[in-house]
């Protein structure tokens, strides 16, 4: 099995590095392509996979093709790829808002998997949601899921609407966490802590809270009740968040991302 990753940006390179470290592919079976000459020079220095600047030299060899380019590049890219694609190739799209139907039409193939990864894939802690066209076999689905899992975990969803919804939760979600972290760090600095100490206070708190959550069956509400005693400091903070409708605002933000993902698919 040969795998090609098109696009060596943050996500494409994250997948390429994870795939080559996994037990599923040898270095000779992983190819990566990018049109930026500077980028290809950097990739060649890594020397963990075969690097190509011309798709005609690598696309025909691939069994599975990961497309990790910005959505606005699709029209131009599809025109270049279509004459070289083969009907038995499986395309895995990491492009936000690009529908399976548009990929099938643009490339002239039917086996398409639409995936929505998130940024922690760069450190092996990613979550990738994905769905498939009906032409993708169970074996092909299982194989691709194993490849996706090299960057963390994956969830197989039923529909493309589910993919758009997951964009609002896991795809864009790391930014929400960073937003909250930034706010806490700024509060810490206003209280007199240094930049370094503010970062340690906040990052370790997040890491510890997530570890507690993952190691138990307790809900977030249960954990909040464990931390917050009546009349205490934590209860004062949570009451302030409730009074300011923070929960509703977070839900609205997630739906804003979801709705934008749907809009992108219609463009």
Image (cartoon, rainbow, N blue to C red):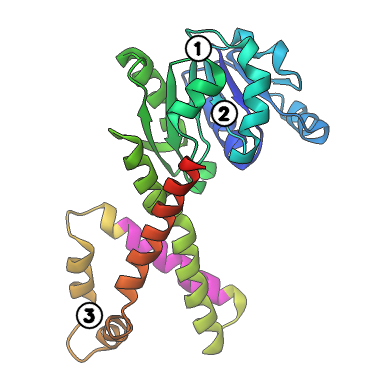
**Residue sitting at x 65%, y 35%:** 73
Give the label, 1 or 3, closer to the camera: 1
Question: Secondary structure under badge 3?
Answer: loop
Give x and y (percent) for residue 66.
Answer: 54, 25
Counting residues from the start of the chain, the first of labels 2 and 3 encountered is 2
Q: Is residue 198 magenta?
A: yes
Give x and y (percent) for residue 101.
Answer: 44, 27
Mark 2 — residue?
Answer: 67
- Dividing the picture into quadrants, the one containing residue 225 is bottom left
Please say if 23 is above or below 186. above
Give x and y (percent) for residue 209.
Answer: 33, 63
Give the label, 2 or 3, closer to the camera: 2
Q: Which residues are magenta?
A: 197-211
Q: Residues within 10 Å of mark 1 (few under 14, many from 20)?
A: some
Please say if 226 is above or below 154. below
Q: Is residue 150 magenta?
A: no
User: Does residue 219 appear to the left or right of 177 in the view shown?
Assistant: left
Residue 228 image label: 3
User: Is residue 166 at least partly visible in the picture?
Assistant: yes
- Furthest residue toward front: 267
């Amino acid at each position: 099995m040969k795998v090609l990753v098109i696009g060596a940006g943050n996500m494409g390179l994250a997948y390429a590095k994870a795939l080559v470290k996994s037990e599923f592919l040898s270095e000779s079976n992983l190819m990566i392509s990018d049109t930026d000459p500077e980028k290809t020079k950097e990739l060649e220095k890594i020397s963990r996979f075969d690097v190509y600047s011309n798709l005609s030299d690598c696309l025909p060899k691939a069994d599975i093709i990961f497309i990790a380019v910005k959505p606005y590049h699709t029209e131009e890219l599809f025109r270049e790829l279509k004459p070289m694609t083969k009907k038995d190739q499986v395309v895995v799209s990491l492009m936000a808002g690009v529908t399976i139907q548009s990929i099938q039409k643009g490339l002239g193939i039917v086996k398409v998997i639409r995936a929505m990864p998130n940024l922690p894939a760069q450190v092996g802690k990613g979550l990738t949601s994905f769905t498939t066209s009906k032409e993708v076999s169970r074996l092909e689905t299982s194989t691709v899921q194993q490849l996706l899992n090299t960057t963390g975990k994956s969830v197989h969803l039923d529909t493309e609407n589910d993919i758009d919804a997951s964009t609002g939760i896991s795809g864009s979600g790391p930014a929400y966490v960073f937003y909250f972290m930034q706010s806490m760090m700024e509060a810490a600095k206003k209280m007199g802590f240094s930049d370094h100490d503010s970062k340690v206070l906040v990052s370790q708190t997040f890491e510890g809270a997530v570890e507690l959550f993952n190691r138990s069956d307790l809900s977030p509400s249960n954990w909040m009740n464990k931390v917050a005693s009546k009349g205490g400091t934590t209860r004062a903070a949570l009451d302030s968040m409730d009074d300011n409708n923070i929960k509703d605002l977070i839900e609205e933000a997630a739906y804003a991302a979801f709705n934008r993902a749907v809009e992108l698919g219609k463009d």
